[in-house]
Amino acid sequence: MTIRILAAALALLAGSAAAAADLEVQVRAPNGQPVADAVVTVHLVARPTPAPKVGTGYAIDQQDIQFHPFVTVVPVGSRIMFMNHDATRHHVYSFSPAKHFELKLEQRQQNRDVVFDKAGVVPLGCNIHDKMIAFIDVVDTPWAVKTGSDGRAVLRGLPATGVTVTVWHPYLKAPGNHVDRNVPLSDGAPRREGFGVALRNPPQAPAISDY
């Protein structure tokens, strides 16, 4: 009897461990071209999404009068190091409700860091160089991936349940610059979802308050 109970418990645990799904998302423009730097996030439907784990080593560089990378994805509570590899001063700032801050980087290689403790999009600008702009997407989910140059993002080990998939890009033509879709995930073969999105042309000298 004890052996049967143990076997049943092991089978239940094995089934629970296997109840996971992989999701592949392809983001393309209307002309079929892949869209890079789109952030794909997943939230659970009808139950709380677990909090993401905070990692280390997040950084944004300033080089050739540009921010690198253009889009950064970090979990809530992350600390980002801002580096300056230009032979000039920069003045990094954001007026975002998710994080309002200013960093006066007065000389080359003067690194400063900021903790991002609220979920939301944080546009970055430089008070000295108008053409510098970048975005930080601070996420409240452990499932968040940025598309590569092929427009593809893969999220592995998702719960086999109903989820909401969100695609965000700073120039996406939609309210809040994002689109959502409910997707049922089941254990077994990977799920593939295609998102067709239209993008606005990047502004020449954007005002950060416009985002």
Image (tube, rainbow, N blue to C red):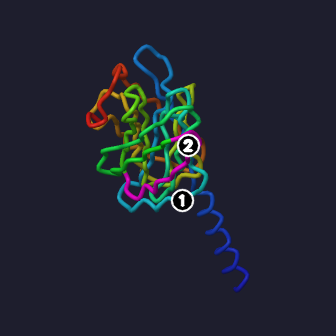
x then y, percent, for residue 21:
56, 49
Instruction: Characterize the local packing of mark 1: few (<14), some (14-19) or many (20 or more) Cα atoms within 10 angstroms.
Output: few
Please tell me whether mark 1 sits on a helix, a strand or a loop: loop
CA gap between label 1 and label 2 equals 20 Å
Total numbered labels placed on residues in the image:
2
Residue at left offset 32%, top offset 27%: 206
At label 2, the amino acid type is Met
Residue at left offset 47%, top offset 16%: 32
Question: Are circles 1 and 2 on residues that touch, CB within 8 Å?
Answer: no
- According to the picture, the residue beneath numbered tag 2 turns out to be 83
Q: Quadrant of residue 175?
A: top left
Main SS of the magenta segment?
A: loop
- Of 57 and 89, nearer the camera is 89
What label sits on residue 54 in the rendered view?
A: 1
For marks 1 and 2, give the one nearer the viewer: 2
Farthest bottom residue in view? 2
Q: Quadrant location of the N terminus?
A: bottom right
Using the image, determine if residue 99 lies above or below residue 40: below
x then y, percent, for residue 158:
54, 52
Residue at left offset 59%, top offset 36%: 85
What label sits on residue 184 in the rendered view?
A: none
Q: Which residues are magenta?
A: 107-119
